[in-house]
Amino acid sequence: MRLILLGPPGAGKGTQAKKLVEKYGIPQISTGDILREAVKNGTPLGKEAKAYMDKGELVTDAIVVGIIRDRLQEKDCEKGYILDGFPRTVPQADELKKALSEMGQSIDSVLSIVVANDELIKRLTGRRTCKECGAGYHIMFKAPKTEGVCDKCQGPLFQRDDDKEETIKNRLAVYNDQTEPLIEYYKKDGALVDIEGTGGIDEIFGRICAVIEK
């Protein structure tokens, strides 16, 4: 079971990925994590990636795909895996397809969690953080007992700059611009499945499992 998980900020992609890992026993491969690990371990590709990062440049698609390819050949990926955060662009999707084909593999499903923009804005702008202890709250889903006050340490709650509406709208616009061509790409491939991303966590997970098990 080889999956790619797509979804805008606030769609609950991370939560669903964790549940998939627990239920099916396949690893979640986050490109950010494996890139950092390759750099830390000083692998040949990790050293190449570090040279780009030290110059403040983006690591090339070929290096990122090479690092992913190395990771997918590890033992825990034999039963499958979930690719999270990659590919982000059509050229990356092409590189990935080539690499997988050389390994005799292909992606089974690309699951795209779909949530309307106004719902995402509501979810993301509702987050609050405690200035004192860093505890997280949400005015809709996990409200503090007293408005604006942390339950744990009574510190004041605030809204981080990246949770403000203007910032969120920009993040969503960037995501949509970047991901739209990718969604079209996988649609043509016949691999894309839209998952309705509203409702309870378990309800959404049920929809994902129904698609996978079909």
Image: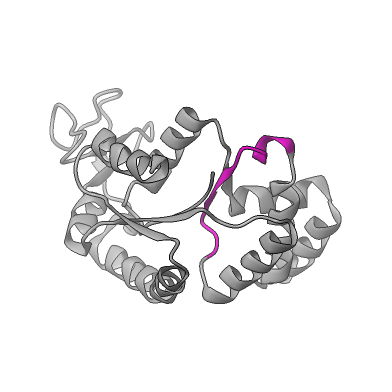
Does residue 170 lie above or below 109 as drawn? below
Expressed as whole percent of the image width and height from the top left, the position of residue 69 reads: 72, 55
Residue drawn at (21%, 61%) of the image:
116
Q: What span is in magenta? A: 75-87
**Most foreground residue, 168 or 149:** 168
Expressed as whole percent of the image width and height from the top left, the position of residue 9 reads: 36, 56
Residue lying at the far front in this picture: please name it: 214
**Most foreground residue, 81 or 41:** 81
Q: In which quarter of the image is residue 179?
A: bottom left
Q: Quadrant of residue 210?
A: top left
Q: Does the magenta stretch include residue 91?
A: no
Is there any visible trace of residue 134 in the rendered image? Answer: yes
Residue drawn at (36%, 46%) of the image:
211
Expressed as whole percent of the image width and height from the top left, the position of residue 139 reads: 17, 41
**Most foreground residue, 192 or 205:** 192
Please give left or right for residue 8 compared with residue 95 in the image: left
Residue lying at the far right in this picture: please name it: 44
Expressed as whole percent of the image width and height from the top left, the position of residue 161 reads: 33, 58
Does residue 155 lie above or below 192 as drawn? above
The N terminus - image quarter: top right
Please give left or right for residue 75 compared with residue 178 in the image: right
Please give left or right for residue 181 compared with residue 139 in the image: right
Is there any visible trace of residue 129 in the rendered image? Answer: no
